[in-house]
Amino acid sequence: MGLYDIFNISGSGMAAQSVRLNTTASNIANADSIASSTEQTYRARHPVFQAVLNGIASHSSDDQASAGVKVNGIIESQAEPVARYQPDNPLADENGYVYAPNINLVEEMANMISASRSYQSNVQVANMTKHLLSKTLTLGQ
């Protein structure tokens, strides 16, 4: 693994955390959305990450010199929607209920902060690598 591999590794981390930030933003934006049935209710989405060892996706925990990350998929929450009795709501079903997603805003904010910090850490790694490469080039002067 060379210094140039670090850019690919930190880049994969930034891409993964960007997906995490997007799904978290979507969850927060839809936290107060309602629907007339449980099937139509927004479900929280969460990315699933997978380690990429030496360019090959792996489920093992072998110690490799070069490891990045990729988004393996985005799953929807299986939590039951919250039923609210609002018979005057135009979206209410025949029993007077509307359904809201079971999204915990505190958990989503913690996810957002964590993803943001991870993204910033990967940016710092890329910047430090760039700095080290720059210093290496000035050694002969």
Image (cartoon, helix red, strand yellow):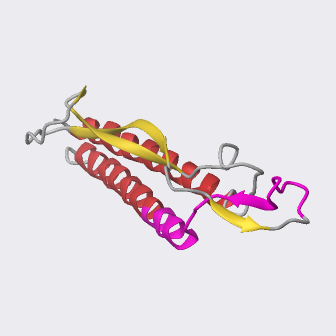
Total labels drawn: 0
Q: Is residue 13 left or right of residue 21?
A: left
Q: Any magenta on residue 21?
A: no
Q: In which quarter of the image is residue 50?
A: top left
The residue nearer to you, when weighing 107 against 114, is 107
Q: Which residue lies furthest to the bottom in this view?
A: 106
Q: Where is residue 135 in the image (x, y as percent from the top left)?
A: 27, 51
Q: Residue at the location (56% across, 49% down)?
A: 23
Q: Residue at the location (50% across, 50% down)?
A: 77
Q: Residue at the location (61% across, 57% down)?
A: 81
Q: Residue furthest left?
A: 63
The residue nearer to you, when weighing 87 against 48, is 87
Q: Position of residue 33 (x, y in %)?
A: 74, 58
Q: Which residue lies furthest to the front in this view?
A: 95
Q: Is residue 141 left or right of residue 123?
A: left
Q: Any magenta on residue 112?
A: yes
The residue nearer to you, when weighing 42 against 45, is 42
Q: Quadrant of the N terminus?
A: top left
Q: Residue at the location (37% across, 58% down)?
A: 124
Q: Where is residue 133 in the image (x, y as percent from the top left)?
A: 28, 45
Q: In which quarter of the image is residue 30?
A: bottom right
Q: Which residue lies furthest to the top in this view?
A: 56
- What residue span does the magenta drawing correspond to? 89-114
Q: Where is residue 79 in the image (x, y as percent from the top left)?
A: 51, 55
| Rendered view: 96 above or below 68 | below
The residue nearer to you, when weighing 76 against 128, is 76
